[in-house]
Image (tube, rainbow, N blue to C red):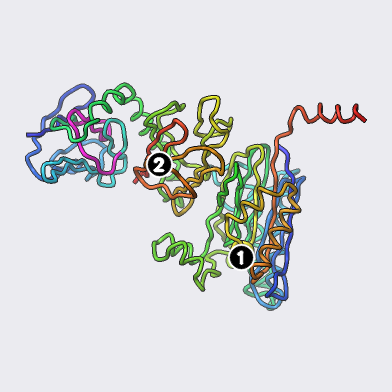
Amino acid sequence: MRLLACGQTDTGISRTNNEDNFCVEEGLGLFAVADGIGGSSAGEIASKMAVDVMRDYITRSASANEPFIGEYNKKHSESANRLASAIRLSNKAIYEASQNNAAWRGMGTTVAAALFEEDRLSIAHVGDSRGYLIRANSIVQLTDDHSVVSEQVRQGLLTREEAAESNIRNIITKALGKDLSLDVDIDEIELMDGDRVLLCTDGLTTMVPDDLILSTVSSVEEPGMVCSRLVDIANKNGGKDNVTVVVAHFSKKKWFSSVKNLFKFAGR
Amino acid sequence: MPKVTLKFKEAVLKEIQLDKEVITIGRNPDNDIQIDNPAVSGSHAKIINEGGKIFLEDMNSTNSTFINGKKISKSALNNNDIITIGKHTLVFSGPSQTAEADKTLQTKKPGLNETIVLDTRAQKAMQAEASGAAASSEKIGGFTVIEGSAEKNEYELTKRLTTIGKTETAEIKLKGFFAPKVAALINRTKDGYFISPPGTKTKIKINGSSLEGRYELKDGDIVEVENLKMQFYIKA
């Protein structure tokens, strides 16, 4: 399986600074988005730390025997546990940094991250940043928001429609940097030829409905183009928040592609 | 007078006349039908006479209640229906209340034992796993195959994503030359199970009407994908 990925972040229309960050590491199979929280630029410090610490941890663990952070979940693969470890390490780093610097006190960040290994994709998240899978013309959300409204929906206090309109829909129940220990949600999926995976911050999902995300992702071939289209739509629809998207395309290496290239070559 | 015959494997243990409005079944001694076996919940199920019509209702038991191999929450009883509770069976003798009753029994009988053994085993494995991780209190759902060719009689949906289709990696595999690679996706979320149809030609029906968009599966829903017909269940 081959991975082709691209990411983009934008301040949006209403905000003056961008507290989102992302990373795309095709070689490591890692991609992530993070949405920082905290005043006076602390939010962007937290989201930057999240992606940097994760990237470093995954890089180290790809070559050396890096210890796992937190409890190893036997129900999931080693790869998924590595991804969760990376997030827990980021959490620790952000927490400690915020304790040691008065200007950074209270900072935090959401994260949605994916790690690709062979034909499997591990997905982990904290907060309301999301992961989506686009397969065979349908879109499936791979993450369940850690937010007050989604808890209320779960308890039957709100309908999904009411939740989308709620004025407290931005309150999340979990974030990196708030506590030394952190529960990270992890899941794994078996990849198929043609799968597309999207990670995004809530700046996209509050501005662009799922079906529009689906039609955009499936109608545009090149991941970078998909990203800029999605950012454009979010801004056209109001751009009330920073918006960050990472799009990854997965495809099987086809046996005939080398033959096809040979013909192309011979035909010249 | 309708009655049930309590059996363990082939041995008949007891015959119970259904002479009350409610007959309770369970491990506790205060039940009308007491089954003293660890696979049976304290209050497991009850048989209710609702104005002459007789129903069996599961009382959120740990290991579920089955009629003719199908997991039920509440269902009408028909003559010769086989109720399975743990490793015990109860055979119902009384009037048939739905026309197709005998037919269902005929088609279900051969695979009966196998299905149930598979299920309790899978359940035990799951419970052992779950006891290790405290967080997994969420309900598990699954499909029981009713009609059509599939590799298994039952599918437990423990993964985040389950694919129905002809493709190699599909968990629920469709057979046939014209079957689509991906016919439907089932997403297990904290809020429940959702089925999404692909945008293309595949015909998916939920309880007889065709599926238009994302749909939350409910206990007992009948799902038809191509020529595969399954019933969705949620384990208590």
Question: Which residue matches tag 2?
Answer: B127
Q: Position of residue A51 (x, y in %)?
A: 71, 59
Q: Within 10 Å of the Cα at label 1, are there few (<14), some (14-19), or many (20+) other Cα atoms?
A: many
**What amino acid does circle 1 point to?**
Met
Of the residues shown, which amino acid type is indicated by label 2? Gln
Q: Residue furthest right?
A: A268
| Residue B135 in sight from this viewpoint | yes
Marks 2 and 1 share the same chain:
no
- Magenta segment, which residues? B72-90
Q: Is residue B124 visible?
A: no
Return the x and y of residue B187 as percentages of the image width and height.
Answer: 50, 46
Most foreground residue, A170 or B181: B181
Counting labels gives 2
Question: Between tags 2 and 1, which lies in front?
Answer: 1
Query: Is residue A245 left or right of B42 when viewed as pictured?
Result: right
Residue in view at x 76 percent, y 27 percent: A256
> To which quarter of the image does residue B23 belong?
top left
Near mark 2 (Cα within 10 A), the count class, few <14, some 14-19 or many ≥20, is few
Parent chain of label 1: A
